Image: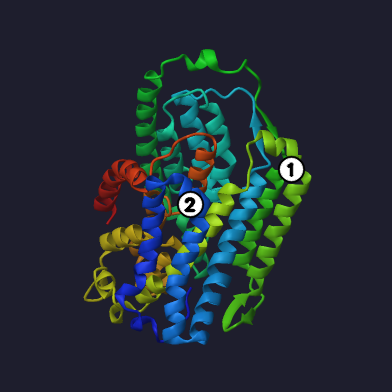
């Protein structure tokens, strides 16, 4: 994903300070002064981005800095944010109306539906499609933070494990030669184990909190109305998004060099097509429907600004990891191999933990290449290693708000609707308690 410039090993460990700084800012500033954060998060992201770019510009010069910035923007950030923008705009034009009462049974059904859809329309598409209905179903409930936490874990992350369309790292593997249905075949059982454990835990947890409600939710719900989907044209547009992503990985039309970065023509066509679909959705959906759906641009703007800073400050981390045993993080790379033999459990945990804090797509690619980078060998002789890398990068995305982009968007939409979500570390306390036990069991059984 990043250019091999020969300078990767030259980045010292302290060059990751801006990345740590932006993560700590996201975690701590909202706790200290939430109003200040809401007013200035874009400036804070810009500050940390410049705190990396300006020293690099001084030390390595304009050409190196511009090349890496262009590489990150053209191959990582713009495709990432355009896909999110398209899915956010289109899903915001779909409204599920009717009587939805947030009982543990209904909440479990909605989360399971989103989990199943995630591998078909992506974790972002499924999360954006169902987050508003599940919030609306639980609007009379006092205890509902846990519902959003479990929703992020299953719909925005683990549900995307069965296809390259589900989650970005699996799409990277598809582009590198991993067969489209390899993930379906090999991650089906691991995903089902995780989903079964987590949904049972959710039902128990939600039943406990449901019984603590001071009022009868059924009595406070609206008069019973049949379920109705409005804005159906957007369902067709979501299919268009899925097809565009699939086609961009299935056909090759050559590359265009932009400031030393080779950009695939089919990727440019995909992004233009996604923007066109978003434009169509905006113009074909009534503004009244979007208003009643609680649609605003704030969540996508927050993600765009914060992840711009994250994508910039993550550059030295990825380049150091790319340098392998020559880089400042050589101990991480060495930990996954024993005299040339892969240690699959370490591949799972290290890919996962890094994916929780770094962008999971380049993290997947780093360990994919560390394991040899040959898709044919990884799909056969080293299938367990590829399973470890794939499941680690997808499953661990649920561990933090920044582990996967829809996490942050779901949190933002929930807070817009008056649900006070946990802080960065508060969310990690929830997710760790839910996920670490099943990760331990899974890694012992499979690796």
At 76% from the left and 51% from the top, the residue drawn is 280
Where is residue 359 shown, x and y percent of the image?
A: 44, 62
The answer to which of 397 and 48 lies nearer the viewer is 48
Where is residue 426 shown, x and y percent of the image?
A: 34, 43
Of badges 2 and 1, nearer the viewer stands: 1
Left/right of residue 86 with respect to residue 375 in the rendered view:
right
Left/right of residue 188 with respect to residue 241 in the rendered view:
left
Cα–Cα span, label 2 and label 1: 26 Å
Q: Quadrant of residue 272?
A: bottom right
Task: Find numbered disc 1 in the image and state the secondary structure of the residue it sits on.
Answer: helix
At 43% from the left and 68% from the top, the residue drawn is 313
Does residue 395 appear anywhere in the picture?
Answer: no
Left/right of residue 321 with respect to residue 411 in the rendered view:
left
Does residue 292 appear anywhere in the picture?
Answer: yes
Q: Please, is residue 416 above or below residue 23 in the view?
A: above
Tag count in the figure? 2
The answer to which of 392 and 101 lies nearer the viewer is 101
User: Residue beneath label 2, please?
Assistant: 162
Q: Please, is residue 122 above or below residue 133 in the view?
A: below
Q: Quadrant of residue 355?
A: bottom left
Q: Quadrant of the C terminus?
A: bottom left
Where is residue 385 shown, x and y percent of the image?
A: 34, 64
Q: Residues within 10 Å of mark 2 (few under 14, many from 20)?
A: many
At 30% from the left and 74% from the top, the residue drawn is 13
Q: Residues within 10 Å of mark 1 (few under 14, many from 20)?
A: some
The answer to which of 293 and 326 lies nearer the viewer is 293
Task: Tell me whether circle 2 and circle 1 mark residues in contact (CB < 8 Å).
Answer: no
At 58% from the left and 51% from the top, the residue drawn is 300
Where is residue 201 shown, x and y percent of the image?
A: 34, 33
User: Residue beneath label 1, please?
Assistant: 233
Looking at the image, the residue that sits furthest to the left is: 339
Task: Find numbered disc 2 in the image and state the secondary structure of the residue it sits on.
Answer: helix
């Amino acid at each position: 994903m990043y250019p091999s410039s020969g300078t990767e090993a030259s980045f010292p460990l302290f060059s990751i300070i801006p990345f740590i700084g932006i993560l700590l800012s996201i975690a701590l500033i909202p706790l200290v002064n939430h109003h200040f954060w809401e007013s200035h998060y874009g400036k804070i992201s810009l500050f940390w981005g410049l705190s990396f770019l300006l020293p690099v510009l001084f030390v390595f010069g304009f050409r190196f800095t511009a090349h890496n910035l262009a590489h990150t923007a053209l191959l990582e950030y713009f495709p990432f944010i355009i896909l999110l923008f398209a899915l956010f705009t289109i899903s915001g034009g779909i409204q599920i109306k009717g009587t939805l009462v947030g009982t543990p049974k209904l909440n479990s059904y909605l989360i399971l539906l989103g989990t199943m859809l995630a591998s078909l329309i992506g974790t972002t598409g499924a999360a954006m499609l169902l987050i508003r209905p599940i919030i609306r179903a639980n609007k009379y409930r006092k205890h509902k933070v846990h519902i959003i936490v479990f929703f992020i874990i299953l719909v925005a992350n683990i549900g995307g494990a069965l296809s390259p369309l589900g989650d970005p790292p699996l799409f990277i593997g598809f582009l590198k030669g991993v067969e489209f249905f390899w993930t379906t075949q090999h991650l089906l059982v691991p995903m089902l184990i995780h989903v079964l454990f987590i949904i049972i835990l959710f039902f128990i947890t939600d039943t406990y909190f449901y019984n603590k409600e001071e009022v009868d939710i059924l009595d406070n719900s609206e008069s019973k109305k049949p379920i109705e989907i409005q804005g159906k044209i957007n369902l067709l547009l979501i299919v268009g998004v899925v097809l565009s992503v699939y086609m961009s990985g299935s056909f090759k039309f050559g590359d265009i060099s932009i400031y030393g970065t080779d950009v695939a023509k089919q990727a440019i066509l995909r992004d233009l097509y996604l923007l066109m679909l978003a434009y169509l959705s905006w113009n074909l959906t009534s503004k009244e429907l979007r208003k009643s759906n609680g649609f605003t641009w704030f969540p996508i703007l927050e993600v765009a600004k914060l992840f711009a800073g994250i994508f910039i400050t993550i550059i030295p981390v990825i380049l150091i990891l790319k340098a392998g045993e020559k880089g400042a993080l050589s101990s991480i790379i060495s930990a996954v191999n024993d005299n040339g033999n892969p240690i699959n459990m370490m591949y799972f945990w290290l890919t996962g933990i890094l994916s929780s804090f770094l962008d999971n797509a380049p993290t997947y690619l780093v360990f994919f290449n560390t394991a040899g980078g040959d898709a044919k060998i990884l799909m056969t002789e080293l299938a367990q290693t590829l399973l470890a890398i794939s499941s680690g990068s997808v499953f661990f995305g649920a561990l933090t708000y920044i582990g996967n982009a829809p996490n942050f968007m779901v949190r933002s939409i929930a807070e817009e609707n008056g649900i006070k979500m946990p802080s960065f570390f508060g969310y990690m306390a929830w997710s760790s308690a839910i996920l670490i036990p099943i990760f331990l069991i899974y890694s012992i059984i499979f690796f």
